[in-house]
Image: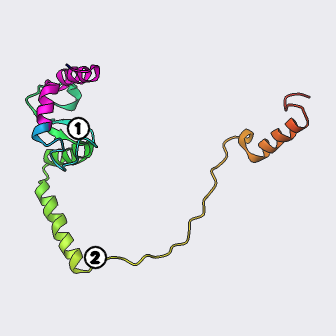
Amino acid sequence: MLTSGEKAKDRRLREIFNTTLEAQNEQRKEQHNACAICGRPFTQFQAYQDHDHDCCPKKQRKYCGKCNRGLLCFLCNKKAVAIIEWMAKVGIDPRKVIAYIESWTEIIKAKGGYAPKEKTTQAKKRRVPKKQTSVRHSDAARKTDRATVVEGQSRNQP
C-alpha cells in the first residue's frame, strides 16, 4: 500500500517521465540506491530521473519514457551530464577535455605544483559598513527615538 506521498510521486513520475514509482524503485536497487555516476547514496542525496534531452526536449515537460536513463544526484544530473550533453551538441569530444586536463595535471606535477603550500599571512580586510538606505534606521534616528521616549513624548507630537 502506497502512502499519500508515494502516490503523489508515482503520479508525477507517470505524468512527466512516463514511468512508475515501482520502476524507479527497481532502478534504485540496480544502482545500489546511489547515483549512477558518482555513487553518492540516495539516503543522503535526492535522486533525479535522467533522460536524453535529444529525444524529449526539456521544454516539453512530458517525456516519452523510452529515453529515461539512470537515477542521478543533483550535481551529476544538472552539472556533469548537462555539460557533457552541451559539449556533444557543439561538437566537443568530452574525452579530449579529460585528456587535456590529465596532461596538464602531469605537467603541473612535474613543475612542483600541487605540493603543500606555506600559509601566508594576509592583512585582514576591513569591513566596510553597509550604506544606510534610510535616515529613519540610522544610529542618529534611533538615539533621537530613545530620547523622545524618555521625555514621554512621541516624535509625532508637537
Query: In the image, what residue occupies the spot 17% across and 21% down?
Result: 14
Of badges 2 and 1, nearer the viewer stands: 1
Residue 93 screen position, x and y as percent = 11, 54
Q: Quadrant of the C terminus?
A: top right
Count of labels in the image: 2
Estimate the spatial distance between the alpha carbons at disc 2 and disc 1, rounded to whole Å.
37 Å
Residue 42 screen position, x and y as percent = 23, 41
Q: Residues within 10 Å of mark 1 (few under 14, many from 20)?
A: many
The quadrant in which residue 148 appears is: top right
Query: In the image, what residue occupies the spot 12% across and 38% down?
Result: 29
Furthest-left residue in this view: 66
The quadrant in which residue 151 appears is: top right
Which segment is the magenta one?
2-28
The quadrant in which residue 9 appears is: top left
Name the one closer to the observer, 134 or 35.
35
Q: Tell me which amino acid carries mark 2.
A: Gly
Q: Residue 113 has which mark?
A: 2
Q: Tell me which amino acid carries mark 1.
A: Ala
Q: Where does label 1 land, which residue?
A: 47
